[in-house]
Amino acid sequence: MTTPRDLDDTQPVRISDTGTYPAVRTPVIQLDDVTKTYKTGAVEVEALRGVSATIEESEYVAIMGPSGSGKSTLMHILGCLDVPTSGTYRLAGEDVSTMSEYQLAQVRNRRIGFVFQQFNLLPSLNASRNVELPLAYAGVDRAERHERALAALTRVGLADRVRHRPGELSGGQQQRVAVARALVTDPALILADEPTGNLDSVSAEEMLELFAELHRSGRSIVLITHESEVADAAERTIRIRDGNIQDAEPVSAGTAR
């Protein structure tokens, strides 16, 4: 039996297990009063003005805003491509606001899966080798890289295209390779920047359905867009204008896919 101790006792206190309690879930994204100011000579531009937002684990959220709204700056911060001027950004509970460039590179490689509008595939490598790249940078051995790349490509419906180079694939298939590359490190967050921007309407619809499938499997997805039709695919939409969050209302029932 433990004995009571004075409140000023500085020794560690062990609390006995008295039952089962629900686990406390850590948000995948926690932004607290984040600002970003760019300076060009004597001119200062406030791109973000005290942004606060929370995105929970396994949520599918769209961030929507017009050109110049600050959404690209916010995407860069969420993706650890830039750091806030002030405020705090926690990714899966880890404060990344003041990390060094080396630490941010590690976070980008291991904790975030990127999907860009331009695909960003290396034309000389086949689909499998393109998907393996994040694992190669992380020092994973070749056999495991190959196995995980095949699993990721199978997950996005490209098991029969693993040896095809980007030039031998359609735009929709290239974007699926990019999604497989984002998945292969099993990241905490999938961050998609205008992922349907270079796709025809049929391929764009297929890409949004793929994101919906990934969300249903438990993935945390943040999608950056200026198109309301794309934002409607998410569970909820965060709207940004003039560097401020305007609202973060859930999508109406039956809209999310």
Image (tube, helix red, strand yellow):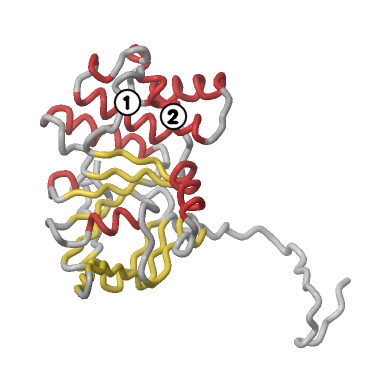
- Residue 212 position, x and y percent, is 29, 38
- Pointer 2 and pointer 1: residues touching (CB < 8 Å)? yes
The residue nearer to you, when weighing 21 against 214, is 214
Q: Who's the residue at 20% across and 54% down the image?
A: 252
Position of 151 relative to 73 (above/below): above
Q: Who's the residue at 30% across and 16% down the image?
A: 165
Give the label on residue 133, or none. 2
Q: Quadrant of the C terminus?
A: top left
Give the label on residue 5, or none. none
- Residue 224 position, x and y percent, is 24, 49
The residue nearer to you, when weighing 246 against 249, is 246
Q: Quadrant of the N terminus?
A: bottom right
Secondary structure at badge 1 equals: loop
Q: Earlier in the sequence, mark 2 or mark 1?
A: 1
Label 1: which residue? 122
Q: Gap in Å between the C-alphas at discs 2 and 1?
A: 10 Å
Q: Residues within 10 Å of mark 1 (few under 14, many from 20)?
A: some
The residue nearer to you, when weighing 160 against 144, is 144
The amino acid on which the numbered mark 2 sits, given as a three-letter code, is Leu
**Quick check: 61 left or right of 220?**
left
Residue 154, quarter of the rendered image: top left
